[in-house]
Image (cartoon, rainbow, N blue to C red):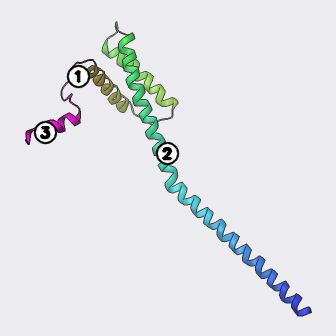
C-alpha cells in the first residue's frame, strides 16, 4: 500500500508539473500573439482610423468651402480660403490628424473645383470625370 501511495504522490507531482509547463507555454503563446499584434494589427488599425479621419476632413472641406462661398460673399477668394484653411487646420488638430497645410490646401482647391463643376462652371481644365475620359477614349476605337 505504501508503494501505491508513493506512486500516486509522484504521479500527482508529475501532473502538477505538467500543468505548470502547459500554463507557462500558454502564457508564452499569449505574449507572442500580443507582440505580433502590436507589430502588425495596431499599425493597421491606426492606418484605418487615420483614413477615416482624413475622409471626414475631406467632407468638412467641401462643407467649409460651400459655407465660405455662401456667407462670405463680400470677402475676396483669398480671405475665404484663409478662413477655410484655419477651420480645417483646427479640425485636424482637434482630431489629432497629422495633416500638412499643403494637404489641406489641396482639399480646399479640390472642394472649390467640385463646387464650380456642380454649379455648372468649367472649374478649369480637365473637368471631365475620369469615367467620362475613359468613355471618350473608347469612342475613338469604334
Q: Nearer the viewer, mark 1 or mark 3?
A: 3
Reading the chain from its start, which is encountered first: label 1 or label 2?
A: 2
**What secondary structure is found at the residue carrying circle 3?**
helix
Reading the chain from its start, which is encountered first: label 2 or label 3?
A: 2
Reading the chain from its start, which is encountered first: label 1 or label 3?
A: 1
Disc 2 target residue = 46
Outermost residue, front side: 142
Image location (x, y in percent) of residue 135: 17, 37
- Of residues 49 and 2, which is closer to you in this image? 2
Disc 1 target residue = 123
Residue contact at pointers 2 and 3, CB within 8 angstroms: no
* The residue stretch that appears in magenta: 119-142
Q: How far apart are labels 1 and 3 at the CA level?
A: 21 Å
The image's mark for residue 16 is none
Disc 3 target residue = 137
Total numbered circles: 3
**What secondary structure is found at the residue carrying circle 1?**
loop
- Quadrant of the rendered image containing residue 99: top left
Q: Is residue 24 above or below residue 49?
A: below
Q: Is residue 94 left or right of residue 12?
A: left
- Residue at image point 61% right, 62% down: 31
- Quadrant of the rendered image containing residue 112: top left
Image location (x, y in percent) of residue 17: 75, 78
- Residue at image point 32% right, 30% down: 106
Q: Is residue 31 left or right of residue 137?
A: right
- Residue at image point 8% right, 39% down: 140
Q: Nearer the viewer, mark 1 or mark 2?
A: 1
**What secondary structure is found at the residue carrying circle 2?**
helix
Amino acid at each position: 500500500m505504501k508503494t501505491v501511495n508513493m506512486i500516486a504522490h509522484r504521479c500527482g507531482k508529475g501532473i502538477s508539473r505538467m500543468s505548470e509547463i502547459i500554463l507557462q507555454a500558454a502564457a508564452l503563446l499569449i505574449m507572442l500573439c500580443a507582440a505580433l499584434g502590436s507589430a502588425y494589427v495596431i499599425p493597421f488599425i491606426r492606418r484605418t482610423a487615420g483614413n477615416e479621419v482624413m475622409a471626414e476632413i475631406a467632407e468638412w472641406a467641401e462643407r467649409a468651402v460651400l459655407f465660405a462661398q455662401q456667407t462670405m460673399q463680400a470677402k475676396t477668394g483669398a480671405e475665404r480660403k484663409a478662413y477655410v484653411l484655419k477651420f480645417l487646420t483646427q479640425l485636424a488638430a482637434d482630431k489629432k490628424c497629422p495633416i500638412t497645410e499643403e494637404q489641406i490646401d489641396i482639399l480646399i482647391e479640390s472642394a472649390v473645383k467640385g463646387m464650380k463643376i456642380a454649379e455648372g462652371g468649367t472649374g478649369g481644365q480637365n473637368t471631365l470625370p475620369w469615367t467620362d475620359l475613359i468613355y471618350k477614349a473608347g469612342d475613338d476605337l469604334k
